[in-house]
Image (cartoon, rainbow, N blue to C red):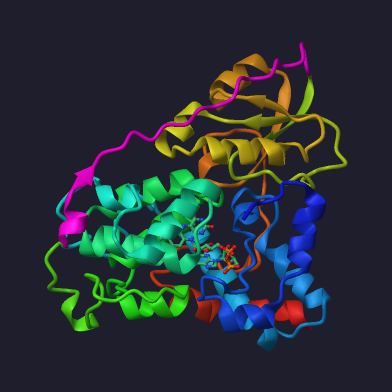
Amino acid sequence: MSFPTDITNIQNQLNRIDPKAYAASRNYLNGAVTRLSPYLSRGVISTRQILQSLANRGFDLGQVEVLVRELAWREFYQRVWQSRNPDDDLRHTQSPCIGPGLCHSIVHASTGIDAIDASIRTLSETGYMHNHCRMYTAALHCNLGQRAWIDGAQWMYYHLLDGDWASNACSWQWVAGSFSSKKYYANQENINRYTGSTQTDTFLDVPYESFPEMPVPAVLADSTGIELSTTLPASDPIPEKFRGKVFLYNYYNMDSTWCAPEEGLRILLLEPEHFRRYPVSEQCIRFLLDLAGNIPGVIVRCESFASLQQQLPDVEFQFREHPITRHYTGVMHHREWMCDEVTGYFPSFFAYWKRAEKHLRRYFG
Ligand SMILES: Cc1cc2nc3c(=O)[nH]c(=O)nc-3n(C[C@H](O)[C@H](O)[C@H](O)COP(=O)(O)OP(=O)(O)OC[C@H]3O[C@@H](n4cnc5c(N)ncnc54)[C@H](O)[C@@H]3O)c2cc1C
């Protein structure tokens, strides 16, 4: 599994979405999922573009509703990050929680649950994990291993090419029950059904009723602390005495079409402080730099916004709204949403969807 980084291939992937097959099979490991999340999360494409493309291809809302709902989950989480800090338990305190740390067997893909171990290996090799396997892994870490969700989230985010702190932290909290009304569990039968494995007699081969009272399984008992850190590339030189517009790209805005006809200096700003807080793997940085190849003339700077500002005192910075750009100053552009109308914090997806659904009908005539 690889993720192309040139625009033509990304566009082809978008045009090939099969919403009917998606609806029938998205929960299965070999299902017709889109694998577009790395491009959505890096801001290369938007949820609106996907919806518009489906409408242009003549689908009606009924035919694409399953996919649209998933895209709406994404927007729902983005709205949460706009109004809350997703590092904090959002609705309930995670409980029980024996403390920080990562289950040693999760990090080393040795939980003994074959399908989960295989998906953890795939994650570190390719930077992708199927949604169901993310849920299974998170449930092992926080609900059976009883470790703090945030440590598991940071480890998974580190590896994911589609790492997006809104979707990541909120999904982990959804599994852990701190942003939902109950914890998520999956037993061996469920894992076998969706991954095609046939394992039996594992510690998950039990009825659902036994999960809430289950003591931490021996294989999840040992915890490990791992140092996650980001290796940033070298900075390019800044053209001397530049004046004019500077377009800022970052880990969440790699849209090569953004203000494309306008003249100016294009800078991919990688702030060390951001990556100290949200570390990512070398594979993620490579993917990002390959995507930067789509932005003509872009230069890379690894420094804070304040430091960049000092070196470019006579420019007008242009940037896109995002929680990671709150300290930027200059001209702020809005992101492209599928549903601009529904903003603010909603305590549940259901509450968000009730408001968003009617606005989404407009794409389909
Ligand atoms: C523990 C956990 C961690 C996650 N971390 C991330 C993350 O860091 N970044 C990220 O983009 N997604 C995350 N997700 C959500 C989801 O797993 C991925 O978006 C999806 O698997 C990406 O693959 P895809 O593009 O093939 O998805 P598809 O099934 O093809 O879905 C299309 C798009 O809909 C959105 N979407 C689908 N499912 C979800 C979902 N459950 N929640 C939110 N949006 C969804 C995504 O933008 C996705 O690209 C996480 C889910 C869990 C359970």
Q: Is residue 46 above or below residue 318?
A: below
Q: Is residue 219 magenta?
A: yes
Point out residue 311 in the picture as x, y percentages from the top left corner: 64, 15
Of residues 229 and 346, the one drawn nearer to the viewer in this rendering: 229
What residue is rendered at 51% in x and 51% in y?
A: 164
Picture quarter containing residue 62? bottom right
What residue is rendered at 31% in x and 37% in y?
A: 226
Magenta stretch secondary structure, dominant: loop
Q: Quadrant location of the C terminus?
A: bottom right
Q: Is residue 137 above or below residue 332?
A: below
User: Would residue 203 be found to the left or right of residue 335 on screen?
Assistant: left
Point out residue 182 in the picture as x, y percentages from the top left corner: 27, 74
User: Would residue 149 be found to the left or right of residue 133 on screen?
Assistant: left
What segment is highlighted magenta in the picture?
A: 217-242
What residue is rendered at 29% in x and 75% in y?
A: 181
Q: Quadrant location of the N terminus?
A: bottom right
Picture quarter containing residue 71? bottom right
Of residues 152 and 199, the one drawn nearer to the viewer in this rendering: 199
